[in-house]
Image (cartoon, grey):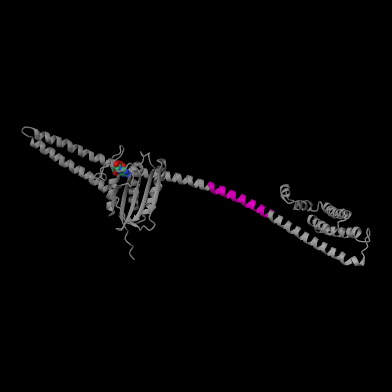
Amino acid sequence: MAQFDAISLLRAPLGERLSSTFVGGRLAAARYALALAFVGAAIALTLVLQYFHVEHNRFQFYAAIAAAAWVGGAGPGCMAVVLSTLGIEYFFTAPFFNLAVAPHELPDFLTFIACAAISVTVSTRLRRAEHWLMEARQTLETTVAQRTAALTIEIAERERADRAREESETVLADTQAQLARVLRMATIAECAAVAHEVNQPLTAILANAGACLRSLERVPPALDLARDAVVGIANDGKRASAVISRIGALLRNRKPSIAPVDLNAIVREVLALVQSAADRDGVVIRTSLSRSLPPAAGDPVYLQQVLLNLVTNAIEAMREISDRRRVLTVRSRLTRSGSVLAEVEDTGIGLAAVDPDRMFDSFYTTKPEGLGMGLSISQSIITAHGGRLWATPGRVHGAVFHVALPVAAAPEV
Ligand code: ADP
């Protein structure tokens, strides 16, 4: 109590403030003096009442005793009982100004002492209870303050750790996206090299066809030259065919290893890869993935490549859209015919300008920088899985690409 600070003292009720001030031993004399003052005030009040012929009672003395016990504790309370008893006996009990107790006054006198003693006991107990309550409150406040400080530090540390984790996750996602882009570029570079190789025999075929025509147009026709040109055409045709077969080999060399795969997990991986690209283009990504999707039969690496291609195409198709929200939605579900289906929908330019019969052909592209290999390779991959890849117009805008895969066979028991 002695260590209560000034603010808690000011906030405390008057009695509490007084009692707090007097506790601690240092102001013991003041507590007793205050008890004396309370009893003195009670005597003075009784004398005034007597002067005005108001029949006096002893309530003011009980009040003085209770106040002395409340403010000063048991010692000043007891002193107030003694002083009040003496005061009443001396001033207000016949014979007046005398401390002798007449025998007929004795029961009344003893009753007063008993009541006064009870008043001191009750006040002292109340005071002690209040004292304990205040101490408990202070301990509680101190504990709460300490815990709050500890919690604040912990929260700040967690926030710092969260920020660090978010930063490293962003760096990781960017790196993964870059890696995916590099892989994609590697595939594109391989295809570009193959395209270049196909182009050489095709140019030679065109040159030989021209030479053949010119030889035939001669009069008389130069049949030997025409035959040589046709032989050249046949040879170049074989060369072109060999190069084309190498494209197939390129895919075949990486034989898909078919196993049960979680298509939803692949979708999530792919979306994580393109997240920063989508953010940069202001594309909102939504998913609606079936929770009861059975495993599909597929090669996760190939399927990731296909979905990455579809999702990248979708983001690219929305690049020029400015009059509506750019939303990429990826759904998955089990179809009624028993296939595992993934759908990639966008709100982009749509398929109006695309030739639906050539869309999945090699080298078909409507983009200035496009190679036109993504959909063709994707379709080869999905067909090699025994599945199907096709496109439909979006419900309002854009396009939807559907990938249907067979459900993985149940493991043999
Ligand atoms: P590229 O992306 O290099 O053009 P693709 O084979 O991936 O090659 O795509 C072929 C063509 O199909 C694209 O040029 C484009 O015209 C069309 N296409 C593909 N995806 C979409 C789409 N989400 N929205 C509209 N058109 C698309």
Residue 66 covered by magenta stretch: no
* 192 vs 75, nearest the viewer: 75
Residue 190 appears in the picture as rendered: no
x then y, percent, for residue 234? 15, 42
- State the image quarter where residue 387 is shown: bottom left
Residue at 10% over, 39% down:
227
**Percent of width and height locating residue 275:** 41, 45
Q: Main secondary structure of the magenta part?
A: helix
Quadrant of the image containing the C terminus: bottom left
Q: Can the viewer see residue 88 in this picture? A: yes
Looking at the picture, tell me which residue is in the foreground, 163 or 63.
Answer: 63
* Ligand 1 image position (quadrant): top left
The residue positioned 90% from the left and 65% from the top of the image is: 105
> Which residue is farthest front?
53
In which quadrant of the rendered view does residue 75 lie?
Answer: bottom right
Q: In this view, does 11 lie to the left or right of 111?
A: left
Q: Is residue 29 left or right of residue 302?
A: right
Residue 259 shown left or right of residue 229 in the figure: right
Q: Measured from the top left, where is residue 333 in percent x and y? A: 35, 55
Q: Residue 9, percent across and down? A: 73, 49
Asked if the magenta segment contains residue 147, the reply would be yes
Furthest residue toward top: 219
Residue at (71% x, 57% y) in the render? 133
Above/below status of 267 relative to 280: below
- The region drawn magenta spans 138-160
Describe residue 233's horizontal placement relative to residue 331 as left or right.
Answer: left
Q: Nearer the viewer, residue 209 or 152?
A: 152
Asked if residue 376 is positioned above or below residue 35 in the image, the reply reads: above
